[in-house]
Amino acid sequence: MIVANNNGLILIRRNHLEERNWRDDTSYKFIFSFFGKSVYQTHYEDLTIHAGEFFFFNPNEPHKQLKVTQEKFLIEIETEVVKEAAIQ
């Protein structure tokens, strides 16, 4: 399910939580694990977070989702928004 508004969208999905393709999005990604272990692969190392933990991916950082328990909370922030906030 996708819920959209002027400031972004919410994606709720219960399928395809296992291995995914490599990504290198142009936005910052904030990933929070609500329910349990999540595992991501980067070119440097595999990253694991547990329930109640989070991490950020920088823009254009290649990564791959290997496993997510039930669901995750994800916020993608465009680089221009971060630049504008830093200036103010």
Image (cartoon, rainbow, N blue to C red):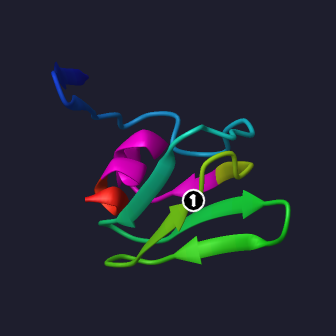
Specify the quadrant that holds the N terminus.
Answer: top left
User: Which residue is pictured at 33% across the width and 49% down the height?
Assistant: 84
Tell me the element at label 1. strand
Foreground pick, 81 / 47: 81
Which amino acid type is marked by label 1?
Phe
User: Which residue is pictured at 65% across the width and 60% down the height?
Assistant: 40
58 versus 75 height, above or below: below
For residue 78, say whether it is visible.
Answer: no
Specify the quadrant that holds the C terminus.
Answer: bottom left
User: Which residue is pictured at 37% across the width and 66% down the height?
Assistant: 33
> What segment is highlighted magenta in the picture?
66-84
Residue assigned mark 1: 57
21 versus 50 height, above or below: above
User: Which residue is pictured at 42% across the width and 59% down the height?
Assistant: 31
Give coordinates of residue 79: x percent, y percent: 47, 45
Give coordinates of residue 50: x percent, y percent: 45, 78
